[in-house]
Image: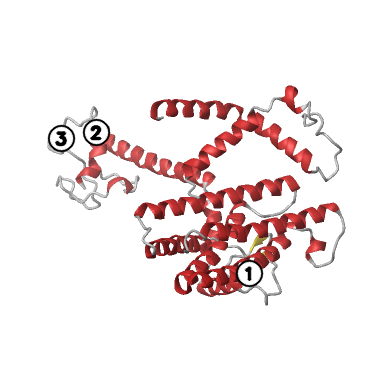
Amino acid sequence: MAFTLYALIQTAILFTNAIAVLHEERFLSKIGWGAEQSIGGFGDEPGIKAQLLNLIRSVRTVMRVPLIAVNSVCIVLLLLFG
Amino acid sequence: MEFRQQPEVRMRGPLMDPRDPGLLFEDTSAGGNRHKPSGVGKGPDVCPGQALLSDPMSNLALVYGSSLASHGKEMMDKNLDRFIPISKLKYYFAVDTVYVSKKLGLLVFPYMHDNWEVNYQQDTPVAPRFDINAPDLYIPVMGFITYILVAGLALGTQNRFSPEILGIQASSALVWLIIEVLAVLLSLYLVAVNTDLTTIDLVAFSGYKYVGMFLGVLAGLLFGRTGYYLSLLWCCVSIFVFTIRTMRLKILSEAAAEGRLVRGAKNQLRMYLTMAIAAAQPVFMYWLTFHLVR
């Protein structure tokens, strides 16, 4: 399977966009993955689910603004070059 | 020599010395031949304390230019060091021939080695030259390049070669390496292990399978499909054992690494993670080479 570096960049952008569009109160709370449900005890064992929720929340917070820029660049490039 | 003086001439254009129209550029030679316009100029790295220049303005411009150049250079070095830690990379390439040969032997025959621990020296790992268990980047890089070359050779013997194929193979293998390293990083984060494995360590450990890959393809070229399958099987098993024995010490906690079975969900999860990482290696080895051997 011939993967190019460009395909990797595309995959990364698509994945990050997918994580960024998970809405907090409309979706994640409904399925029990909301932000307030991951604050468990302060033991040394966070557990996989808490780590995953933390990861989703931090990706959404951190990548929101860069994603706007990257998506705009992608839109312009795709409009110009097909 | 002349064009090196030119930027300074342009810089001090409006400040051109009216007393000296014949001297188009200053003479920065160390000797006393300041009246000869074609002296041997040393350019911007002349000592700023030298007061042999005839024009104080050009002296100022020279000092300013040299300080600007050195400032730019050190800023670039600092910024480059932030993105690509060059000093840390140097550690991974501090290898010698004995280490490389022993490590290659260990990659294809890891069954006789008993002590897999990395020696530390005041909290930093010892350089690979002195410790065979330390990860290095030399073997993965060389293995990667050799794999690309052998892939080109294999495709050439089947008349499927074209120069773009080499680039496609290289980028494809690189992309799979990046995906694998990201997957391992993600799973290490999710399982919340406290390990001192850096990203470069993971790249090194994932790069060790290129050795097995190109050995398999080489055997496939020489001995046909049976040779390819046999050598690939051998290399897959050895990489599996090698990875398990190396990763076990890094990921699992101390008690489990010594061989005592510690019950508990945490260690079990970590053991599964180690086995998953190790099992991914033969899968990648087969995936990236089977289309090369017909």
Observer-nearest of B167 and B116: B167
The answer to whether dots 3 and 2 both sit on one chain is: yes
State the residue at coordinates (15%, 35%): B20
Quarter holding residue B44: top left
Q: Nearer the viewer, residue B219 or B41?
A: B219
Whether residue B93 is visible: no
Q: Chain of mark 1?
A: B
Location of mark 1 (residue): B238
Work out how far the residue at label 2 is from the one at label 1, CA to CA, in angstroms.
65 Å
Q: Is residue B45 left or right of residue B138?
A: left
- The answer to which of marks 2 and 1 sits earlier in the sequence is 2
Query: Residue B263, image x and y in percent?
Result: 87, 58
Res B20 label? 3
* Residue type for callout 1: Ser
Residue at the disc numbered 2: B10
**Mark found first going from the N terminus, 3 or 1:** 3
Which chain is indicated by disc 3?
A: B
How has the structure been colored for display?
Answer: secondary structure
Up/down of A16 relative to B195, above or below: above
Q: Chain of mark 2?
A: B
Q: Of circles 3 and 2, which is in front?
A: 2
Q: Residue at x 34, y 45 (%)?
A: B48
- The extreme bottom residue here reads B112
